[in-house]
Image (spheres, helix red, strand yellow):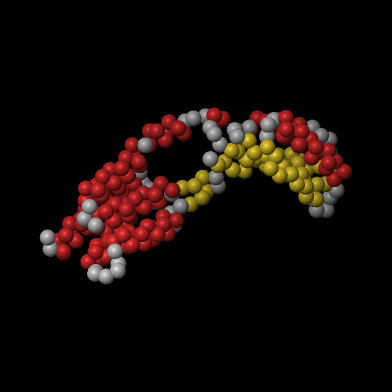
């Protein structure tokens, strides 16, 4: 088969399979949709075809390794963090898979590329019911670490007492104390005591009890708590 015809076939396969992956992303209105995934697959295939056409040291496997590195930078540009939530991870991973499909197609492995495409689409569509089922699990039963911050403002002479109350409350509620510090409040005879606590389950009610207990202290002028972060 003529090299030009083979190139056209390989690029056609990369275009079709990249579009198949991108169609699912476009349908779900993700940042990288039909055209982006198609272009990634075409680009990856083109680099591999180029390496196979030019004699010398440049092998398709070396080019494929460079494609993987390049797609890493592209994927990093669509990952965002909003508070405790991270978005764009699935889209970035899909782009990476589109590049892999393009590499296979560019090397003329159409059946392997089609099989990889089927698995990518299954991961994005077929696993959605399982993800929803897992997400319906009550947070209290999930195996996660939750970090809390407790802030208390009290008079400076009572700082030691408030720190002791915090330590006792953390021990009684099975909370792990990660940090305990005190900072003087400017232009006042008061100090802010801050405690960072960790637990393996949601403990909103426990934190509310601790803050309520501290609020009863006559020297406390302010007491509050907040969830800092949640990680697997």
- Measured as percent of width and height from the top left, residue 172 is found at 72, 30
Q: Quadrant of residue 105?
A: bottom left
- Measured as percent of width and height from the top left, residue 64 is found at 33, 59
- Measured as percent of width and height from the top left, residue 218 is found at 84, 35
Tell me if residue 35 can be seen: no
| Left or right side of 46 for 178 | right
Q: Residue at x 54, y 34 (%)?
A: 143
Tag count: 0
Quadrant into which the N terminus falls: bottom left
- Measured as percent of width and height from the top left, residue 158 is found at 85, 41
Q: Note whether 4 is above or below 215 in the view shown.
A: below
Q: Residue at x 63, y 40 (%)?
A: 147
Tell me if residue 178 can be seen: yes
Q: Quadrant of residue 229?
A: top right
| Left or right side of 100 for 214 | right
Query: What is the residue that sits farthest to the left in this orientation?
Result: 1
Q: Residue at x 79, y 32 (%)?
A: 216
Query: What is the residue that sits farthest to the right in this orientation?
Result: 157
Q: Residue at x 56, y 36 (%)?
A: 144
């Amino acid at each position: 088969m003529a090299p030009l015809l083979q190139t056209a076939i390989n690029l056609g396969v990369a275009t079709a399979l990249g579009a198949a992956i991108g169609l699912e992303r476009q349908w779900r209105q993700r940042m990288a949709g039909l055209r982006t995934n198609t272009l990634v697959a075409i680009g990856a295939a083109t680099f591999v075809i180029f390496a196979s056409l030019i004699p010398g040291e440049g092998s398709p496997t070396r080019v494929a390794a460079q494609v993987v590195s390049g797609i890493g930078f592209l994927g990093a540009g669509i990952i965002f963090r909003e508070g405790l939530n991270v978005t764009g991870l699935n889209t970035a991973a899909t782009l990476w898979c589109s590049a892999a499909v393009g590499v296979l197609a560019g090397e003329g492995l159409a059946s392997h590329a089609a099989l990889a495409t089927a698995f990518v689409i299954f991961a994005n569509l077929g696993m959605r019911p399982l993800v929803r089922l897992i997400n319906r699990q009550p947070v209290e039963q999930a195996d996660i670490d939750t970090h809390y911050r407790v802030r208390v403002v009290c008079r400076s002479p009572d700082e030691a007492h408030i720190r002791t109350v915090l330590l006792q409350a953390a021990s009684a509620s099975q909370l792990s104390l990660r940090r305990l510090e005190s900072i003087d409040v400017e232009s006042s005879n008061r100090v802010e005591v801050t405690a960072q606590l960790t637990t393996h389950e949601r403990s909103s009610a426990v934190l509310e009890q601790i803050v309520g207990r501290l609020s009863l202290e006559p020297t406390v002028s302010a007491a509050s708590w907040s969830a800092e972060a949640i990680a697997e």
